[in-house]
Amino acid sequence: NALGLSAEHRVVNLFEREHLSPDYVKINPLRTIPAINDDGFILSESRAIMTYLVSKYGKDDSLYPKDLRKRAIVDQRLHYSNDVFYVLELSLKPLLFNLKKPNEEGLGKIREAQENIEKLLIGQKFIAGDSLTVADYSLVTIVDALGVFCPPGDKFPLTSEWFKRCQVQMKNFNKVNKNGADQVVNVLSSLLSIIP
């Protein structure tokens, strides 16, 4: 991980509905993943967890700047990543739970998200400026999954270069991000290939 923290990881299987179990609801009444327990402090929502951990344990402020204007841009991109995830979720749910391909409206929203990400990268190396931040961590796997529904081809060269930079600069990218993302991409691709 980017902070070099050691942590106990517990897998919560959504398909087995483990997030609805009484034990998990005690940890996170919202029944969402991920959630952390940091010495008794319980927090859920990946973006909130990232900013908390970086603020508490970060060796410097490069991943989440203290400068108000720089942080505001990072926060804006973090909030935008939530919007992009929602767009992805609109196509994921019908596919995963009803075995239905995304409709044209859903695909249009995915293409729009891909175009917007490309625009955000104009004139900068990363999503919130010229250095890696928590916003990049938040968006990188979402962007990868968007490509399953709307393969980017060579339409988004800035996004492609950004993704490559993330792979190089994010510690243990393949172990932490890419392996899980590849599994998701493979499942989605398999489902899309068998649905008429």
Image (cartoon, rainbow, N blue to C red):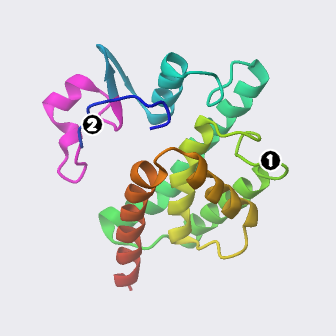
* Residue at the farthest bottom position: 196
| Residue 162 sits in quarter | bottom right
Q: Secondary structure at mark 1?
A: loop
Amino acid type for the residue under numbered disc 1: Gln
**Camera-nearest residue between 116 and 8:** 8
| Image coordinates for residue 93, horizontal then vertical, percent | 39, 59
Q: Secondary structure at mark 2?
A: loop
Q: CA distance from mark 2 to mark 1?
A: 34 Å
Query: Where, quadrant-wise, is the C terminus in this rendering?
Result: bottom left
Number of marks in the rendered image: 2
| Image coordinates for residue 128, horizontal then vertical, percent | 72, 39
Circle on res. 19: none
Q: Residue under circle 1?
A: 124
Is residue 162 shown above or below 46? below
* Residue at the farthest left position: 22
| Residue 25 sits in quarter | top left
Callout 2 crowding tier (Cα within 10 Å): few <14, some 14–19, many ≥20: few
Query: Where, quadrant-wise, is the N terminus in this rendering?
Result: top left
Callout 1 crowding tier (Cα within 10 Å): few <14, some 14–19, many ≥20: few
Q: Residue under circle 2?
A: 9
> Residue at left 73%, top 32%?
73
Magenta stretch in the rendered image: 12-35
Q: Is residue 178 magenta?
A: no
| Image coordinates for residue 174, horizontal then vertical, percent | 44, 55
**Camera-nearest residue between 177 and 78:** 177
